[in-house]
Amino acid sequence: MSKVTYIQYDGVERVVDVPNGVSVMRGAVDNGVSGIDGDCGGECACATCHVYVDDAWLAKTGARTEMEQSMLEFADATKENSRLGCQIKMTEDLSGLVVRLPAGQH
Amino acid sequence: MNIHIDAAELNAAREQANSMPLDKIDVSDPSLYANDTLWPYFERLRREDPVHFAENERFGKFWSVTKFRDIMSVDTNHQVFSSEAGGISIAERPAEFTLPMFIAMDPPKHTPQRLTASPIVAPANLARLEGLIRTRVAEIFDKLPVGETFNWVDRVSIELTTQMLATLFDFPFEERRKLTYWSDIATTFPEPGAMVETFEDKKAILLDCLQNFTKLWNERVNAPPAPDLISMLAHSPATRNMPPFEYLGNLMLLIVGGNDTTRNSLSGGVLFMNQNRGEWQKLRDNPALTPSAVSEIIRYQTPLAHMRRTALADATVDGKQIKKGDKVVMWYISGNRDDEEIERPNEFIVDRKNPRHHIAFGFGIHRCVGNRLAELQLKIVWEEILKRRMDIEVVGKVERVLSNFVHGYTSLPVRVTPNAY
């Protein structure tokens, strides 16, 4: 288990234990964190699990894949630290990860 | 409840679907959609031949991809499965009059054009539109004739989606039914008896549409940028130099995309609540289920039955060899009834566990750009129905569109009773 802090758009923080190997998207959906939909189920195909990775964690969460890049291009309010939650799988190293959620998901 | 469901017709179709030689099954036949007998044919394909080859005079040779996961794999592989090479519909585009539009483009051209249109349906703009949509829904509902039979399709579904489009384009409001007309023309395959009978007639009508919109473009391009779609297209570096036919193509895309789709989910929801009174009761008892019910309505309706791709290279889909140049049709309407992905898929369940996991909006880079606007409109309509305690009873024969692309209704005779519960 690793801890993830989701900061919702309204500022509410949710700290959730996510099993290692499980994605940041799944961790949110399974724990009712509002603001992440995950419509496609984790296939990097809908961009409804858009998150902003806290700067301190950016290096550890790795780079966007090519498909992720394509999907993020069409998400609303994409920034440098934008990722798709389904493409970040939790590991021991990521315990304590902080992500912020956008105003809405497309 | 008094709905006409032709059980005998569906049973006959099931018998035929299960007894005919597999290679003769052709799910492109528009009559299957008009008489609502498509289901057993897709059931058999998903079971016995999920990636199915067929050929006919009208649409030529094509592959039908019928299972959710297979559709997802085609939809997300835009490098191999092109939207540009042959367009996005099973019907071939007429060589002499093909309109470029971003849904039928591949990267890199697709990207900036889509990005020009997407801010209109971004969260900030939807928040701005919500109050307006609610006011218009209320006005439409307040004028419904109580105790009389009327066509829900025309009076509510078309009226509301057309008003929305006129707003998004900042199109002259009193002329808004022109948008409905052009949308219908754009999706009509010209043939005797259809709304337009020849490609020449269709072209003439769409050129008239272009003329109307060119006038608006010229007004907007010389004015400061405004938050309507025409102004956005006229001022964006990605689209401001579009040739006229590309402007027309993108307009038709946005008109059809915002019109034929939500319109039919608005009608479908009313029908499904009539066919499933227990689910309607559940929603009445717990209006917090509305967002979930909206997703379920969209899945159950699947207002666009398919999208088409063209293979740019040899590929394998679920064991079948697709050759370069082949036409590949993704039947969203079938993927949404795939029991390997969706539990009890043939049942309409307003409190389904994972209602957003459906394929009606497609997946990948061409996923519906207006999906949140569609959901918002549907949500407001059902909230306003519940607020008025309105019962909507389907009281006559349901008539459906003769099309394997637009999956919807031409007639849904209803009678409404406010304060019914």
Image: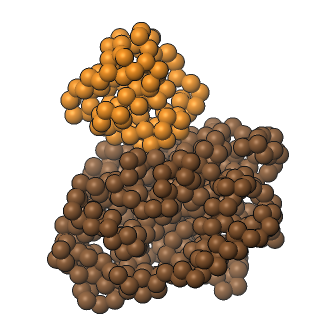
Chain colours: A orange, B brown
In front: B183, or A9?
A9
Q: Can see residue B107?
A: yes
Residue closer to the observer: B244 or B390:
B390
Residue B93 in the image, given as x and y percentages of width and height: 72, 63
The answer to whether residue A78 is left or right of residue B94 is left
Q: Count the marks: how many?
A: 0
Q: Where is residue B302 in the image (x, y as percent from the top left)?
A: 51, 61
Please state which of residues B42 and B127 is positioned toward the viewer in this rendering. Answer: B42
Residue B176 location (% of width, % of height): 41, 73
**Residue most toward the top?**
A93
User: Is residue B420 shown above or below B384?
Assistant: below
User: Which quadrant is the C terminus of chain B positioned in?
Assistant: bottom left
View extreme (bottom): residue:
B148
The quadrant of the image that shows the N terminus of chain B is bottom left
Residue B247 occupies quadrant:
bottom right
Judge whether residue B239 can be spotted in this image: no
Residue at (52, 23) in percent of width and height: A64
Residue beneath the point at 38% across and 52% down: B352
Height in image: A79 above or below B320? Answer: above
Q: Residue at x 44, y 52 (%)?
A: B370
Tell me if residue B28 comes above or below residue A97 in the rendering. Answer: below
Please provide percent x and percent y for residue B378.
35, 61
Q: Residue B348 vs residue B97: left or right?
A: left
Q: Using residue A92 as the reference point, say whether residue B54 is left or right of it.
A: right
